[in-house]
Amino acid sequence: MEKLYLHVFSLLLIICLFPQHLKSQDDDFVRQPPRGVIFTHHTGSDEDPQQVHISLVGKDHMKMSWVTESMHVKSLVEYGKVSGIYDGKATGEHTSYKYFSYSSGKIHHVTIGPLEPATTYFYRCGGSGPEFSLKTPPQKLPLEFAVAGDLGQTEWTKSTLQHIGGMDYDVLLLPGDLSYANSHQPLWDSFGRIVEPYASKRPWMVTEGNHEIESFPPGFMAYNARWRMPYQESGSTSNLYYSFEVAGTHVIMLGSYAEFDAESDQYKWLQADLAKIDRKVTPWVVVLLHAPWYNTNTAHKGEGESMRQAMEELLYKARVDVVFAGHVHAYERFTRVYNNEADPCGPVYMTIGDGGNREGLALMFEDPASPLSLYREPSFGHGRLRIVNETHAFWGWHRNNDSNSVVKDQLWLESLSSSKACLHPGNQKVGSSSVNDEL
């Protein structure tokens, strides 16, 4: 009861002292407080698959990942286009790990395919247990991404996931901070169970955040064992950064917590990866990372600056269209930017670390706002990026309003590959007079 009084008192104090920080750009909407952490338990048998999630591998394969408490279950996936009829079969690999007194279950990774685009498949993991279904992304545009960062596992997380699942999408992108385990390994299991109803149906492509790091010894043991992304297919040597392509869109997942200076493996990999992109074939380029390079919130101010200084020029010369970040527990959208100036050939930067984490919202924005920041709001929610065709995409940010999701920010984007002024990566900076034309 004492903790409840302290929580209520703290919230009332914030409302009294900083009411401007609890309101969005809608004067009548007041921020709601953090909600409790959800911890889920496995209710099936030791042999039953749990924490099932899928990810893209190459142009027509998918990786199925799951955990069993039993160490005797085979790493096997059976699949087909008709429920209960499995004419495809694939085997894979497994791993497990120990962290002090915690021992993980058997973690399975099996790649299936080739799969047909925009097709529903039914599958079963481990040779028994429940049947799951998935839908593969389309081969051609249009394509829709759901984007959510800093998910965690709270009642707000549950709300965000319900809103995401309430409308169809093709791929989910998550710019770091998945489980908020913070070395407490059972939270990884709980998180996997919470997201399974969604992550088992559509591919989830993720990159790491600071809450994925084990405190001692520092590292990404659990993350790398459980959420294995297709890094080798893109020439990366680390699960912390990689890229993939889907339906005319090249997506790059950068690692804010891997080395990124000009002599680092990540920098050299990014340089080579960007050089391979053919914008005539792949007109859209999207980048995700965790710590934002542009941020007018007082939370985590400047934490992405050294990475920006090291890598921003690479993204600018490659004419990257959009950069999504997490880390800051709020939503913010910038105009097209390069080197802290408005530039029509720079990416649109967005912070979307508002998925539902247990730490609550980052309420404090700098005042006055930077002219580069076009929309900012400390609310939980998620985003939708619909790549409509080779030249245009539509972005919408959806605020969580309890039982429903409300679109509060939206705009049309034009691919930089279709811009005559920005067409050639070697161009010098052009004037900024038209930087807000598309916005």
Image (cartoon, helix red, strand yellow):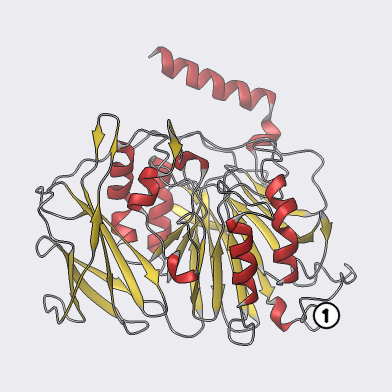
* Res. 62 in view: yes
Q: Which of 23 and 430 is in front in this view?
A: 430
Mark 1: give few (<14), some (14-19) or many (20+) Cα within 10 Å.
some
Mark 1 falls on what kind of element? Answer: loop
What x and y, as percent, mark residue 393?
Answer: 61, 75
Residue depicted at x 52% and y 58%: 241
Name the residue that disc number 1 marks. 421
Q: What's under tag 1, amino acid-wise?
A: Ala
What x and y, as percent, mark residue 388?
Answer: 57, 80
What x and y, as percent, mark residue 420?
Answer: 80, 84
Residue 275 appears left or right of 197: right
Looking at the image, residue 206 lies above or below residue 69: below
* Res. 408 in view: no
Residue depicted at x 57% and y 57%: 254
What x and y, as percent, mark residue 17?
Answer: 68, 23
Q: Nearer the viewer, residue 419 or 339?
A: 339
Outermost residue to the top: 2
Residue 200 appears left or right of 275: left
Looking at the image, residue 172 lies above or below residue 102: below
Residue depicted at x 88% and y 67%: 432
Residue depicted at x 41% and y 76%: 58
Quadrant location, the C terminus: bottom right
